[in-house]
Image: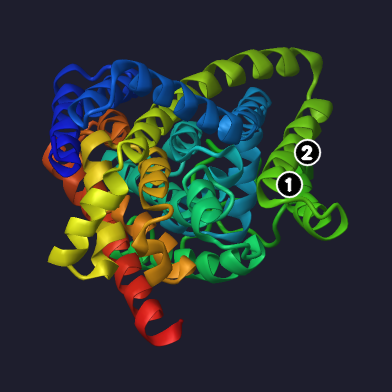
Amino acid sequence: MDPLIAFAITLALITLISIRYRISPFFTLIGGSILFGLLAGLSLDATLSGITAGVGKVFSAFGIIILCGAVIARLLQEQHQIEEIVTDIRQRIHNPPVIAGVTGYVLAVPITCCITAYIMLNPILDSLEKDPKKRNMLLYLSAIGAIISYALVYPTPVVIPLFDAFSGGMNPLVFDAITIPLSLVALAGILFFFRWGSAEGIVTDKTRIPAVADPSTPITGVVSSPAPVHWRAWVPFIAIAVSVPVSLFILQLSHMSMINFIMLVGAVTALVLSPQAARSSGLTQGAKHAGIIIFDICGAGALGFVIVKSGFAQAALGQLTLIIPIIFVPFLLAALIETAQGSRVVTAVITAEVLAGSSVVGAIHPIPLILLISAGSCVISYVTDPFFWLVQRTTGDDIGTVVRNYTLPVALVGLFLFIVATVMEFFVF
């Protein structure tokens, strides 16, 4: 069967099964791998060998990173240090919508999972607003803020496979020097979208948040000076930040070695600073949560590897470039994969596998190329997206409201990134 038709059938069935049965993405992706391999003409043995190789490749790339991020997150949660981090931000930023967006943005990168960051922030954001409608706006903003940094800032599981596949030896600090300001512009645009600080917003500009460690304290009163920063809660993140230049300029590690090194430094720092009770629970619960994330991503690696092994990239991409301008190919491919299975990490892994070595890579500069794929991973965050259903459950809103306040803003971020990437490709690089 033509690989493009096989790919379309596989994505359609993955979408149908994901919506109807809501089973683990790992099994739907492994099943999709077998189906695609057989439809594309591979033998069962070759398909299963490709699945095994794809799972192993992704596990070796992400296993340490995600485990360390999950352990850090759990240790902070066990010691109520997430509340302290939010309190520190509250002392310096007095607008709850900004707090929600910024904390989601900040936590998603070192924790290496935007959904985990959202879950951790959920009970804390409840204390910032008691009005259900306004509280839900904070939850939407924290979710979108986490997605923005997760899709754009190195090192996250979304950006790592794209950077490794397409950067061509670029320094990751150079990449972040471009994408961090860009992501902050996108976050500011989303805050404007929700009309923060206006008369109809969640809080007026004159409202001040008390500088106290207890996040349940009502948002009233005026503070004269902020309380001391809870440095102990920030130390694992500081250790990660400090270890980046050390790994690059002193140890001279490769990109993949660097990301494993800095995450190990962060996790070890968090473990050393934690009491025994929190340490034991943090390791156990963190490993359990990391296992779920890792295996879902490994399923994506299996599908991506089988797709590449089938010759899809040469056949299908050649057809696509005859129909549409090449600048649209990575964007539309990522959007299609994201729509089918809902995970941005899975989208990044599969798209990187499919495009690597194709004519698209040589035709588009690495930075716009990565931005185009990140943009495509954002444009359709709907029923196959597990984050969509998590936001729906935590807010209690109907599906139409979630689409308006979650799917649409994330899509606007994707379109913004697409426009920026296109401008960069034609006028900058």
How many callouts does the rendering have?
2
Within-10-Å neighbours for mark 2: few <14, some 14–19, many 20+: many
Name the side, left or right, on which 119 lies relative to 135.
right
Front residue (pair 93, 327): 327
Q: Is residue 73 left or right of residue 277?
A: left
Label 1 amino acid? Ile
Task: Confirm whether residue 185 shows in the render.
Answer: no
Residue corresponding to mark 1: 240
Give the image location of residue 429, x and y in percent.
Answer: 46, 81
Q: Which mark is residue 110?
A: none
Residue at the bottom extreme? Answer: 427
The image position of residue 204, as x and y in percent, is 39, 63
Q: Residue at x 78, y 57 (%)?
A: 248
Circle 1 Cα neighbour tier, 10 Å, few/some/many (<14 / 14–19 / ≥20): many
Query: CA–CA distance between discs 2 and 1?
Result: 6 Å
Seen in the picture, residue 293 relative to 332 is either above or below; the reply is above
Residue denoted by label 2: 265
Position of the N terminus, as image quadrant, is: top left
> Hey, which quadrant is residue 270 in on the image?
top right
Q: Is residue 413 visible?
A: yes
Secondary structure under the numbered disc 1 in the rendered image: helix
Please tell me which of labels 2 and 1 falls first in the chain: 1
In which image quadrant can residue 187 be found?
Answer: bottom left
**Residue at (23%, 33%) from the top-left corner?**
384
C-beta proximity under 8 Å, tags 2 and 1: yes
Identify the residue at image location x=25%, y=55%. 317
As shown in the figure, which amino acid type bears the numbered disc 2?
Val
Q: Is residue 287 left or right of residue 280?
A: left
Element type at marker 2? helix
Q: Nearer the viewer, residue 117 or 129?
A: 117
Q: Position of residue 251 (x, y in %)?
A: 85, 52
